[in-house]
Image (tube, rainbow, N blue to C red):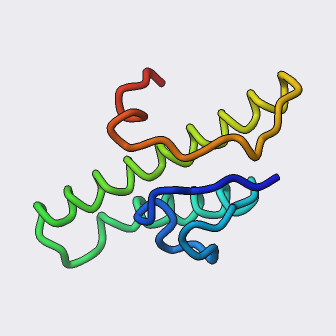
Amino acid sequence: MLCTCPDKAWIEGTSAPYGLRMADDDILSRIKSLVDEERSLAGDSESPQDRQARRQRIEEQLDQCWDLLRQRQALRDSGGDPDAAHARPISEVEGYLQ
């Protein structure tokens, strides 16, 4: 149940080295970490501009994580191999309707 994550920035903060595959549980763990980080933004000492930039990066990475999990589930549901899923570029997943 692993998938290749081609975007090095996407896997920052995960235990999987760049280019290796990640399981659903790894992706879910990364989502939890990003959500926790996003919630902590209100109380830190960053400037408003830095905080906004960091929030934007977190939201982009969350979009990638959720998209990757959806791809994997769709492949499973259709009898496909979830390992064929891959992290799509931020520019692609940001345009999706939620």
Tell me if 83 is positioned left or right of 70 in this view. right
Residue 64 % position (x, y): 49, 45
Residue at x 69% of width, y 61% of height: 22
Q: Nearer the viewer, residue 84 or 31?
A: 84
Residue 81 % position (x, y): 82, 38
Residue 26 % position (x, y): 69, 63
Relative to 90, does residue 75 appear above or below in the rendering?
above
Tell me if 59 is positioned left or right of 19 in this view. left
Relative to 88, does residue 40 appear above or below in the rendering?
below
Residue at x 68% of width, y 62% of height: 21
Quarter location, residue 92: top left
Relative to 76, does residue 52 appear above or below in the rendering?
below
Relative to 87, does residue 25 appear above or below in the rendering?
below
Residue 70 % position (x, y): 66, 34
Residue at x 84% of width, y 25% of height: 77
Quarter location, residue 71: top right
Tell me if 95 is positioned left or right of 21 in this view. left
Residue at x 16% of width, y 66% of height: 50
Q: How many marks?
A: 0
Tell me if 7 is positioned left or right of 47 in this view. right
